[in-house]
Amino acid sequence: MNMDTVTVLKFGGSSVADNIRLNMVAEKIISIKEEEKNIVVVVSAQGKTTDQLIKEAKELSAVPDDREMDVLLSTGEQISMSKLAILLKRMGYDAISLTGWQAGMYTNKTNQNAKIETIDTTRIEEELKKGKIVIVAGFQGINEKGDITTLGRGGSDTTAVAIAAALKAKHCYIFSDVDGVYTTDPKKIPDAQKLPTLSYTEMLEIANEGARVLHNRCIEVGKKYHIPIITKSTFNDKPGSVVQDKIEDTSVKSIVKNDDIILVDIYEEENPQKWLSFLWKLGIDANHFMIKENHLYFTIKNSVLNKFQEVLEKELQEKEVKYHSISRIAIVGHGIKNDTTVMEKVLKIIEKNHLEIFTLEESESKIVIMFTKQVEPSILEQLHEDLCAQNKFI
């Protein structure tokens, strides 16, 4: 069997949220099946299922056990895959649903944020040879102990691109409720423009800054194995955005404002650096470390604050720990460091609005500002107007 003929489709939670939308997904799969012989479909949990499961678990324990959370959260995708298989069979198309472990998805031992180590595609290929549409539960795998693991929020994207790489697929479609990658969040800024194409590097920067378009690890896999990733809407047939190898032009491609961040400030009179290795061993999902005048600063997501307080403060007991809700804004585009007008415009807006900068970073493809507090949504609008509105991407 020529695996080059395989097409991988991934459908997000909003796409499979209820039976009406599952029918829309099934129709889209069937239309693609008419053109592409071998179809592998990866699905997320329906709607807000994962959020609801997390909420229910936290009603039982403020800090639920990671292993048991993986067992619990993996059920969401299994519901989606089986419902979709039932529906496709009723519509006259042979389909089979496979869990992550049935599909040969082997990961490391890390619970809640596991990484894929190998994929044994034997079962998937066997079912494709029988002419079946193979539906795989995203977001999950199995470790060497036989325990269920999950890949972190958004991990179904990574499942899809990893399967595409393992099967040497032509490309991988990521379907959701948005029809591509935009210059900023179109729900916040109506004038946001869709980007027809962008590089893996640019997309990775956007994802790493908190934009919920693609899981960052799926982009890394796509880049490594040269799998074009096409983001499209489940609910219309508009052209999407293609993430692929490309010659990068010099322009601001996207602006990401992330308010889901807590700045942690630990005061240590003797040596704040000593807490770095301790934090690393704990496995706390922390970023943006900085040591300044007996203070260790770093950021965590709002979602891990309870875990941080429960686990870490036992060790810090008498240390002074402060938490600040802040904003982080990233301006992404290859080569923008060489365009001095970009930084000039950014600083002018910051000065005009009397904003206080905590840190400012600049690289070849990104300018990042962390502020000392959360900034107004209007700042994103002003930046987008000055940096992106004049660009014509389509």
Image (cartoon, rainbow, N blue to C red):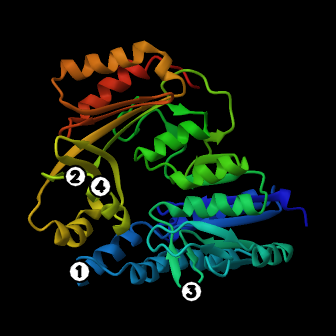
| Mark toward the viewer: 1 or 2 | 2
In this view, the residue in front, 41 or 209, is 209
Mark 2 or 3, nearer chain start: 3
Q: Amino acid at mark 3?
A: Lys
**Category of crowding for the residue at label 3, using alpha-carbon neighbours closer than 10 angstroms: few (below 14), some (14–19), many (at least 20):** few
Q: Residue at x 8, y 65 (%)?
A: 318
Figure check: 158 above or below 206: below
Q: Which residue is mark 2?
A: 272
Residue furthest front in the image: 270
- Inter-mark Cα distance, 3 to 1: 29 Å
In three-dimensional space, the C-alpha distance between marks 1 and 2, rounded to whole angstroms, equals 35 Å
* In the image, residue 188 above or below residue 191: below
Point out residue 371 in the picture as x, y percentages from the top left corner. Answer: 23, 36
Q: Position of residue 72 (x, y in %)?
A: 42, 82
Tag 3 residue: 145
32 or 44: which is nearer to us? Answer: 44
Residue named by callout 1: 59
